[in-house]
């Protein structure tokens, strides 16, 4: 790995290599390390000179990676208004990176890099890919300020398609329809590539643990919009019904997200009987293996939840809210169950039903694994991305 430790300093790919340059623009290096490392390797193997620009907060394991890393000083904010205030400093940083790296293609990953990266690319010959991994809190919020920001985002992404032939990559069919019909992005610029892919050899089917108690697992950031409070409320109703069960949550808070749950509130929730929040877990596989079902009661804004794909790959039944993104992997009565969002009573009833039907849990888990093998493998998703990069060079 080549790491330039001076923020925003990089050497033009055209000066160092005859290969076409590909720049990944990401908020956090930790996210890139956990979700996109294999994609970068596949792009390099396909003949691209790869650079990653991200905020580098920790000892991400890029050892042996065949790409450069450029530290990028994104501003941390905890509100929509704060994000708007950070727009110009962030834009300046990204413009500097584009000017120095001079990539042929820039792949902006998630909404914030997509907006800022698209603006930074205006007036340049760089081709743009905007991967929206769920529209998140900005498009979930209903305040007047949020609606104004939503309008601005739609305009920028639509203009990026017109000005830089930008492809907008969505992870679920509902978001793809939204891009075409509401954002008015031409169909030829919209792509559906579902998630980051799951390495099947790393997520191996596991047998059910002994029961009772019935162990429900949530793998998610500790955000209100992930339905954490709803899950705890439903679990308390489940316990009142006499079902012997546990609720375990793995994930950390996100102070940069307006929906983040304060640590003091998480401590209160953890003090309830049967409820445990373990914080961030480096390897979720043991947690999945020790659980009977994986739960995601998100309220909205999802792309394609990786937690559900990982659980499905390990033959665990799924219980999730009936929203875009979740529906891509949770097929009712085939791979799991769905319930309306923000409905503790319905969620509690589904948890009780799942606890009393072990044969169905096993059957759904096996079907979930087959669905991941057929539709969500890393090999498939990588090949779809590489083909997209090569579109620009044809």
Image (cartoon, rainbow, N blue to C red):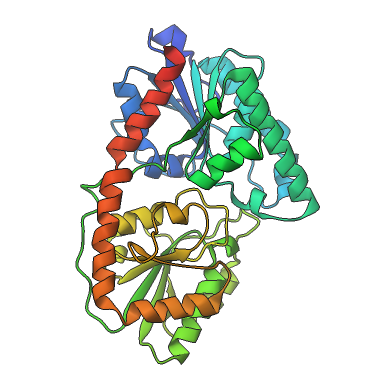
Figure label count: 0
**Residue 73 seen by the camera:** no
Q: Position of residue 234 (x, y in %)?
A: 50, 79
Above or below, comparing residue 367 to residue 246 in the picture: above
Residue projecting furthest to the right: 144
Q: Position of residue 25 (x, y in %)?
A: 52, 31
Q: Quadrant of the C terminus?
A: top left
Residue in the picture at 59% in, 16% down: 99
Instruction: Judge from the rendering whether residue 79 lies leftward or rightward of residue 56; answer left or right.
Output: right
Question: In which quarter of the view is residue 299 placed?
Answer: bottom right
Instruction: Judge from the rendering whether residue 56 lies leftward or rightward of residue 75; answer left or right.
Output: left
Q: Nearer the viewer, residue 194 or 7?
A: 194
Above or below, comparing residue 254 to residue 171 in the picture: below
Residue in the picture at 38% in, 57% down: 308
Q: Position of residue 96 (x, y in %)?
A: 61, 21
Q: Position of residue 139 (x, y in %)?
A: 65, 49
Q: Quadrant of the N terminus?
A: top left
Above or below, comparing residue 99 to residue 382 in the picture: above
Q: Nearer the viewer, residue 94 or 156?
A: 156
Residue in the picture at 40% in, 82% down: 352
**Residue 362 seen by the camera:** yes
């Amino acid at each position: 790995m080549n790491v330039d430790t001076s923020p925003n300093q990089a050497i033009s790919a055209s000066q160092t290599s005859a290969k076409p340059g590909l720049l990944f623009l990401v908020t956090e290096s930790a996210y890139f390390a956990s979700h996109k490392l294999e994609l970068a390797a596949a792009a390099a193997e396909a003949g691209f000179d790869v650079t990653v620009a991200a905020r580098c907060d920790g000892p991400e394991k890029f050892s042996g990676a065949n790409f450069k890393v450029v530290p990028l000083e994104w501003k941390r904010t905890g509100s929509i208004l704060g994000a708007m205030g950070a727009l110009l400093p962030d834009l300046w940083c990204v413009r500097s990176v584009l000017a120095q790296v001079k990539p042929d293609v820039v792949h902006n990953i998630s909404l914030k890099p997509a907006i800022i990266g698209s603006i930074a690319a205006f007036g340049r010959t760089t081709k743009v890919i905007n991967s929206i991994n769920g529209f998140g809190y900005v498009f979930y919020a209903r305040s007047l300020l949020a609606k104004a920001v939503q309008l601005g985002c739609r305009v920028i992404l639509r203009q990026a398609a017109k000005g830089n032939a930008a492809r907008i990559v969505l992870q679920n069919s509902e978001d793809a329809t939204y891009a075409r019909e509401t954002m008015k992005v031409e169909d030829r610029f919209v792509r559906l590539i579902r998630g980051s892919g799951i390495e099947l050899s790393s997520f191996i089917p596991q047998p059910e643990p002994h029961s009772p108690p019935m162990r429900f697992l949530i793998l998610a950031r500790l955000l209100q919009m992930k339905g954490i409070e709803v899950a705890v409320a439903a679990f308390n109703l489940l316990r009142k019904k006499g079902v012997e069960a546990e609720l375990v949550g793995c994930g950390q808070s996100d102070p940069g997200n307006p929906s983040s749950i304060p640590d003091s509130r998480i401590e209160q929730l953890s003090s309830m009987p049967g409820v445990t929040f373990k914080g961030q877990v480096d390897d979720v596989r043991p947690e999945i293996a020790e659980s009977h079902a994986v739960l995601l009661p998100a309220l909205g804004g999802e792309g394609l939840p990786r937690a559900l794909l990982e659980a499905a790959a390990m033959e665990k039944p799924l219980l999730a809210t009936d929203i875009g993104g979740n529906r891509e992997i949770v097929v009712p009565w085939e791979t799991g169950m769905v319930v309306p969002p923000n409905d503790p009573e319905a969620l509690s009833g589904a948890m009780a039903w799942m606890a009393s039907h072990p044969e169905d849990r096993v059957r759904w888990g096996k079907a979930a694994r087959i669905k991941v093998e057929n539709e969500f493998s890393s090999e498939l998703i990588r090949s779809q991305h590489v083909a997209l990069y090569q579109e620009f060079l044809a």
